[in-house]
Amino acid sequence: MRKFLSGIYLLLLFAGAVNAQAVAPDWGKIPAHPRLLLLKGEEESLRALVKTDASWKKVHDEIIRECDSILQKYPLKRDMIGRRLLQVSREGIRRIFFLSYAARTTGKKKYASRCEEELLAVCNFRDWNPDHFLDVAEMTLAVSIGYDWLYNDLPEKSKAVIKKAIIEKGLLPSQNSKYNGWLRGNNNWNQVCNAGITYGALAVYEEQPQVSQELLLRALTSIEKPMAEYAPAGNYKEGYSYWGYGTSFNVFFISALEKIFGTDFGLAEKPGFMESAAFYQHLISQSGLPFNYSDAGGLEGLQPAMFWFANRQKDPSLLYIEKQYLQESKFNARTNRLLPAALIWANGISADNITLPKVKTWSGKSDNQVVMMRSGWQKNQGIYVGFKGGTPSVSHGHMDAGSFVMDANGVRWSADLGMQQYNSLESAGLSIWDMSQHSERWQVFRYTNYAHSTLTVNNHLQQVKADAPLIKFSDDSLNMRAVLDLSAAYAGDLTRAQRGIAIANGQYVNVRDELQAGDSICVIRWAMLTPATVSLVDGNQAQLTSKGQKMILSVIGLPDVKLTTWRTDPPRSYDAVNPGTTLIGFEVTVPANTKLAYNVMLVPGEGITIRRSDLKSLDQW
């Protein structure tokens, strides 16, 4: 009876998991070890790749060098930072993935022996910290790859310890409702946790086939929730860093299914998912800096998942940025724990075959809309603008509606501070995951409109639940432009607020605001966060300098305006410092129910004339 009921459960679970074109898993297809990502004998293709391609040989050699460095370190210990073990789990992936890769591609026993040592060390932790389940998920994925890839070389005693840990420290906690709320989530937690637990289930399939099947089918159902968020155009609402996190693990999940079952069960065809690779590519400017809105960190460097997308779409132009990383050896092997996957997903593609992208703009409707525009793709040439709409209420959101980054000729003139490390804020007792209007999250300087290149009205915060939609967009090469409606973000102070940004003739940037005050007087602050030096301010015009270059910022339409600067010193003890940055802008007082319109021109270099035709109203854009 139990077997019969379990079979019905599996069928019902799977019925909601996949589309009509998909097929049910053929459990008989599960091969012997190794089965995750790289089947038995497939390491030969990697050996051939690094012998014939100089760029990939550099990546391979860097991984091997890091493995030699790991040999000199002590095995990992269960060291918590605040409530997280995540830094240990991530280093666990890096060490175990790198070492098992080295063992398979070089055949040298020293790497397999050290990988076994790392595996046993983490498997002897009392747990993998299920209270913060990302820690469990990443550790489970790490241990599963090591166990699977070295299965035929590990002593039976070690295998027993490792598979027991996968089951008891990974799979069983994932079935506990106390820890598995991520199953219902629609963000990176769902993607990472489902990938990690699925790797665990597939690694120990022989030990508990029925449970492993249930976990895989559960994952196929659950992971559709975050994948639905890519629709319709590929915009990943959590931004640059979390695309690199959530989407990478989503690709790990799909890649394992494809390798074992010969199908992804229709997941890659989910609306917007494949298009998200172009979204991610457009987040990087010609200067190599990311459009780092919301909780984004620094530059990620080579992104393995992009090779999976490029191969799947047969579009090598998606790898134009990755080509630069390959050529410049920006592999980040000490931090890029997923790096070996780049060689696996490269599928033999050479940097020589990666072509220049044709499209220079990106826009997409979503819960957290952004626009990216550039005058070209050549490194350190031309202008780049990333323009942020959307809402602060999404996962990892900031009060940054209307903010923008701008680069010209390899220099970032308008910037975003990005994220502050969570532990520094949690240690101060702040409840930073409450996204309500009066949450302590909005006491953090970097999270507010005060610290972004946008407007502040009456010194008020933006409205958390507001949305700033994209209402106009053009990819005209001579006048790329986009308009956002910011009115809801300033509800209660302004009755209308629209901001347009254009790259005019590929030479300069025009920021135009059209505003209307509400029923009382308003003080409007226009600000731009810049890492440049503000070297001269004269009324409505200022000169900025950086890296030997100049840019003129001028205000047109406000005759008596006077530009000024504000410091970015942290206002509270728990705020991160913001060295080398300044806010430049102006304040203007607007009577009740009064309309206001002006342009702020950002003109890099010298000898460029502003066209009067660029000063027209937004309804003519």
Image: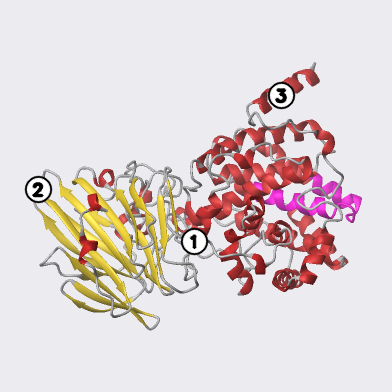
Q: Name the residue under label 1.
A: 297
Secondary structure at badge 3 equals: helix
Secondary structure at badge 2 equals: loop
At label 2, the amino acid type is Ala
Residue 39 lies within the magenta run: no
Segment colored magenta: 135-164
At label 1, the amino acid type is Gly
230 on left or right of 469: right
At label 3, the amino acid type is Leu
Along the line of sight, which residue is nearer the eye, 238 or 5? 238
> Quick one: label 1 or label 2, which is nearer the N terminus?
1
Q: Position of residue 304 (x, y in %)?
A: 64, 59
**Given contact means CB atoms under 8 Å apart, are the residues at marks 1 and 3 in contact?**
no
| In front: label 1 or label 2 | 2
Q: Residues within 10 Å of mark 1 (few under 14, many from 20)?
A: some
Q: Mark 3 points at which residue?
A: 11
Q: Would residue 126 be visible to someone looking at this image? A: no
Query: Is residue 332 positioned above or below 160 on the image?
Result: below
